[in-house]
Image (cartoon, rainbow, N blue to C red):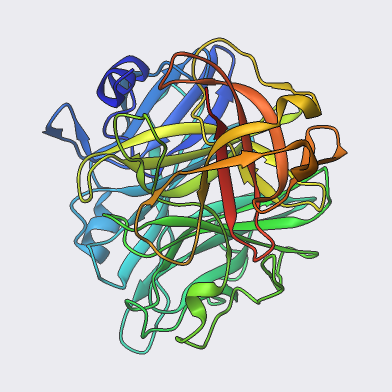
Amino acid sequence: MELTALLAEIGTRGVHDPTIIPDSRGYTMFSTDTMIDGQPTQGIQRRHSPDLIHWNYQDQALSGVPADAQDWSQAQGLWAPEVVSGRNEYRLYYAASTFGSRRSAIGLATAADLDAPFIPQGLVLTTEGGQDQRNALDPNVIQDGKRQWLCYGSFFAGIYLAELDPATGMLKKPDDPGVRIAARPRALNNGSIEGPFIYHSPLTGEYYLFVSYDSLAYSYNIRVGRAKQITGPYRDFQGHNLIADDPLTADQVGTKILGSRHFAGESAQLLAPGHCSVLDVGPKQYLVYHNRAVAGGPSFGLVSQLHWTVDGWPVVSPEPVYGAACSISVAQQSVVGDWDIVSLTASTDPIESQRVTLTAADVEQVGPEQFVLVGVGHGNVWQEYDWAIDQPRVVFSGITPQGWGVLGKKAG
């Protein structure tokens, strides 16, 4: 199948910064206002799906830019929606800014149900540049027991975590910007880190901070660190703190689980994955994110399964959710053979898959669907539907000994 045919079928062209909320009919996706079939929009896009695969554009959940947000930021559109369930209502957090500016705002709108229009309720947080290096962008709301937190931030000063008042959805301490939990040096493209999302895993009990590095247009990549407490410190696979101060080594910080890549035989590259969120569906987790097929070209939304390594790291499927459900474990003997492997590195260039042959001596099973592949990495092997060949395929996702994500598809 061609990528263009896939996107036409699943209906996520124009999706940027997606997040998904389960509802009584299936799932509702909210995303940044980009383009719909070549037409500009102004407001938060809303789509619906019965199955996480096929999405139908519904309407704008929040039309236009609320007056207070526009007056403060001069924004021409709204970015990076986050939707959570509040007290007898749904709360939509959004960012209002202009590209490259720190004069930004995070606002709140509410609705009685997911299909209703969201009504603006005011600004939660503003930043204005100058001495204030923070940037009020990319809101993520986390419920941690009885406490609620706002994770936000972007280039310049990095990612912050501030406590919310669960009763109002506003900052608990309006003058407190919170604690900084991740950052990159200004020397690296003004500290290019954004799109934070914190996930508290019931499997490991730890907190996982997902962020996007580099340029959203062509070099986005998704990295993760984990912590024992929600306030950090967040550390990567190698133990590096995600507050990275040294520009000479900052590209090595953060466990990179997804980047630009191309598998042999596929019709197009998948470039600049980023601004992800995590969706729980029963016992499974899914990574929700956007991609591009051409650098600087239109974005589109994808949903891929998350799996967890034996040592508690999230790894993402090389396949978007598509086709018949067939995500099943495989026997050790099924892992032996030829593989197309994408080994991620610090480079933001697209990685082409390489053919690797595994013998029985190269494969060690260390748990259910958990394998060590000599010369490749450790991680998870299972069977999943491959959109490119339109049939099930054995896939692998893991981490190299050096702490980089690695994805594979069994050849043939």
| Residue 21 in the image: above or below residue 195 | above
Q: Residue at x 31, y 73 (%)?
A: 102
| Residue 317 in the image: above or below residue 322 | below
Q: Residue at x 51, y 88 (%)?
A: 246
> Image check: 216 left or right of 410?
left
- Report the residue that reaches farthest toward the right: 367
Work out whether residue 181 can be spotted: yes
Query: Where does the image place residue 93, in percent across and percent down from the top left?
Result: 45, 48
Q: Quadrant of residue 371?
A: top right
Which is nearer the eye, 345 or 128? 345
Q: How many marks?
A: 0
Work out whether residue 282 can be spotted: no
Q: Quadrant of residue 109?
A: top left
Query: Where does the image place residue 178, in percent across and percent down from the top left?
Result: 59, 74
Which is nearer the eye, 316 or 206? 316
Query: Where does the image place residue 71, in percent across and percent down from the top left?
Result: 22, 61
Query: Where does the image place residue 265, in percent across and percent down from the top left?
Result: 37, 29
| Residue 58 in the image: above or below residue 317 | above
Which is nearer the eye, 40 or 55? 55
Q: Residue at x 29, y 21 (%)?
A: 2
Location of the N terminus (image quadrant): top left
